[in-house]
Image: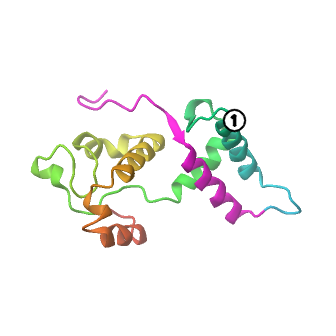
Amino acid sequence: MVLGYDPCPMTGIHITDIESAINYWRAQKPALSGVLAPETRALAEVYGRLVFHRATQADELAMPPEALNAWLTWYDSTPDTPCIAICSTSQGDDVCKGCGRSFVEVQHWLEMRPTEKRQTWHRITRQGTAWRFNKYAERAVEGRANPAG
């Protein structure tokens, strides 16, 4: 373990990410004669279980491999980093004013699992206080077009 980095113990995939992945696959492989593509069906089964149990997160480690692989393919189509190239953690802030990530999250981003990254994305989006969501929102849009950041 890297000193100061504690991987998020919760390995959940949020229901909104499952929804987004379902919609991604519906666009990639539309249903033919009412039959869903295998990826869509696998994710829909996970989504259905979440709804039935009134849960908001699916356990990454307990997901059927087909559903997890479909989710990971969707994940690969999303922006990796919330960075907008204004990093105040390099100036000593505990939380970056630009993207909203903690110093530890910025330092260990490349080591984080996709589910940990998505949990960070959910938190900073929900908080909405980072400059990426207000002052410099246009940079965030530019970053999606050029995911090198």
Is 26 placed left or right of 9 in the picture?
Answer: right
Placement of 27 over or under 93, stated as above or below: below
Quarter of the view holding residue 131: bottom left
The quadrant in which residue 87 appears is: bottom left
Residue 8 magenta-drawn?
yes
Viewer-side residue, 16 vs 111: 16
Instruction: Give x and y (percent) for residue 138.
Output: 32, 73
Please state the horizontal and vertical placement of residue 84, each as a whole percent of the image: 28, 63
The residue lying at 64 percent from left, 49 percent from top is: 70
In the image, what residue occupies the spot 41% across and 45% down? 117
Q: How crowded is mark 1: few (under 14 residues within 10 Å), some or many (20 or more)?
A: few
x, y percentage for residue 100? 28, 51
Q: Return the residue at label 1.
A: 52
Furthest-right residue in this view: 33
Q: What element carries label 1?
A: helix
**Residue at left 21%, top 46%?**
95
Say left or right for 66 vs 34. Answer: left
Quadrant position of the C terminus in the picture? bottom left
Q: Residue at x 57, y 44 (%)?
A: 15
The image quadrant where one finds the N terminus is: top left
Q: Give the range drawn in magenta.
A: 1-30
* Three-letter code for the amino acid on which mark 1 is drawn: Phe
